[in-house]
Every structure is written in structure tokens, then in C-alpha cells.
Image: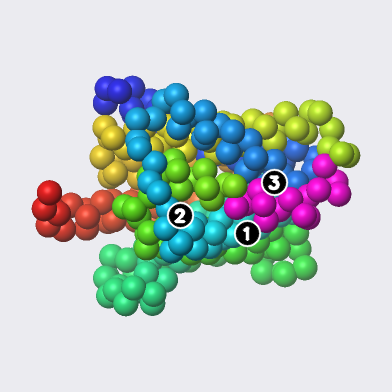
Amino acid sequence: MTPRSALGALHIGALMFGLTGVFGKLAAASPAIIVFGRAAFAVLALAVFARFASNTTWKRLALRDWRRLVISGVLLAAHWVTFFIAVKVAGVAVATLGFTAFPAFTVILEGLIFRERIRANEVLLVALVTVGLVLVTPDFNLASEATGGLLWGIVSGLLFSLLSLNNRASSGRIPAVQAALCQNLVVAACLLPVAAPGLAEVRALDWLWIGLLGVFCTGLAHSLFVASLAVIKARTASVVFAMEPVYGITVAWLLFAETPTLRMLMGGALIIVAIVLSGLMGSASQAKQPAASA
């Protein structure tokens, strides 16, 4: 993969991730069924990628690896369910902007869990996200659908942050595609008891949207992301993936007439700037660390 093709793959991956809320809204099914179907189709897509397009040797997993993967799978399931609840309640734009608060949660939780000092630029990051969320909030009436949906989106971002931190604790031991496949297996297993009673009532068209969500927005997007990181720097990847909410909100605008207000656009811009800063700070700090000896 050349740098140009890797950059193109990264943008396609960001677009696919950005379309998650769109396919979730198109599918007329409960969040539990959507998440179960997404995970099941993602397992198939990741298995195909691992078999035919990945040269990575899979690791034999120890008990502690399985324990961390199960925890990650449960967090991933909760993250997806809360995100799709937000989509159903308040629409794609509000849900996506609520979720993108996760870098601020990560900064705070890393300081608490890993006892890392929170730097001044990270305080700025948290402040930008906080102001952005205040601007995005249509009103502060908890009874309103928009505010409730935003809160569900924020909870989804918190869960994704916890998922990222758990993955950080186990990073380096398990190949990314193997970890993603195992986590999606756990997601499907968690949601099957809840989703099973309603599976027979899901329309064929809704299965199409769920299938696209699992194959393209999960399996393909993750595979493109992993493959591109072999060529593209993490700093560049963080900037490209800041486009994810832009893609999602734009498509929702065109398909569902979810026209964002000027205040929402301003809040979203602040949150996206925070995402870019978060990625740049993370990659810069990694670059300053001494390289591990071979």
C-alpha cells in the first residue's frame, strides 16, 4: 500500500465510520437488534479480511487476554446500544456530536486510572469539548428529546473512552483485527438473548441496512484503518478521523433534512478541533517516548 492509497483508505474508513448513525437510523429495528446484527456481520467481514488480506499471525490467547477481551466486548456493546438509542431519540447529528466528547473523557480518565498528570493543553481540550457540548445542547430541559438524545450520546462517548483505555491496557499483545473480531463475538453473544425474540420480525430492507453497517461501517472500516496505519503516521490518521462526524452529519443533513443550527455548527466545530488536538497531542507524546529495544 502506497502513502497515497493508504490516505485514500483512511478517508474511506472515516466515511464508513461516519455513516454508522445514518444506517442505524435507516434500520427500523430496536438498538439491541441493530447492535447484534452489526456485530454478527462484522465478525464475518473481519474473518474474511483476516483470512485473505492480513498477513498478521494470530496470538494464542491467555486467560487474562480473554478476560480483557470480554470486558472490551461488553463495553463495546453498551457503547453501541447507547449510541443507537441517541440516534433514535434525537437524530444522527446530535448523537454523533454527543459521542465525539470521548477525547475529553479519555484525558480525565487516563489521569485518574493511570495516575498520569493532566497537562495544560489537555485542560484546554476538555474546555473546548465542554463549551462545544453546551453550544450543541438545544436547551437544558431533560424532558426534551434533543437533550435526552445528546445525553445518551455523551454516555456512549464515555463508554467508548473506557473501551479505549481497556484496549490500551492490553495493547501490543493481541493483533488489532484479532482483538476486534473477538470483541464483536462478545457483543453478539451479549445482545443475542435480548435481540432473539424480535429477529423474525425484522424486514429484509432493515437487514440490508444492518448488514451494510456491520460489513462496511465496522469490518471494512476497521480493516482499512489497521492497514493504513502501516503506512500513515498516527498524527495524520487522527486528523483524517476528525472528519468522521462531518461525514455523518452531512449525509444525515442530505437524507433526513436534519439541518443543524448555527449554534450547533459552532459547537460541533469546537468539538472537532478538540478531536484533532487530542490526536496530535497523543501522537506527539508517543514520538517523544524512547524507542523500545529490539
Task: Kindly indicate the quadrant of the structure image that contains residue 57.
Answer: top left
Q: Which of marks 2 and 3 is in front?
A: 3
Q: Residues within 10 Å of mark 2 (few under 14, many from 20)?
A: many
Q: Is 60 on the left-hand or right-hand side of 48?
A: left
**Of tags 2 and 1, which is closer to the observer?**
1
Placement of 119 over or under 85, stated as above or below: below
As shown in the figure, which amino acid type bears the numbered disc 1?
A: Ala
Q: Earlier in the sequence, mark 1 or mark 3?
A: 3
Picture coordinates of residue 75, whole percent (x, y): 56, 60
Report the Cα–Cα distance between label 1 and label 3: 11 Å
The residue at which mark 2 appears reads as: 271
Colour treatment of the image: rainbow
Q: Quadrant for the N terminus, please.
A: top left
Q: How far apart are marks 2 and 1 (CA)?
A: 23 Å
Please name the residue shown 26% across and 26% down the image.
3
Residues in magenta, as a range? 186-199
Residue found 78% across the figure and 55% down from its top:
194
Query: Between disc 2 and disc 3, whose residue precedes?
Result: 3
Amino acid type shown at disc 3: Phe
Q: Which mark is residue 36?
A: 3
Q: Nearer the viewer, residue 110 or 242?
A: 110
Amino acid type, mark 2: Ile
Q: Residue 284, image x and y in percent?
A: 21, 53
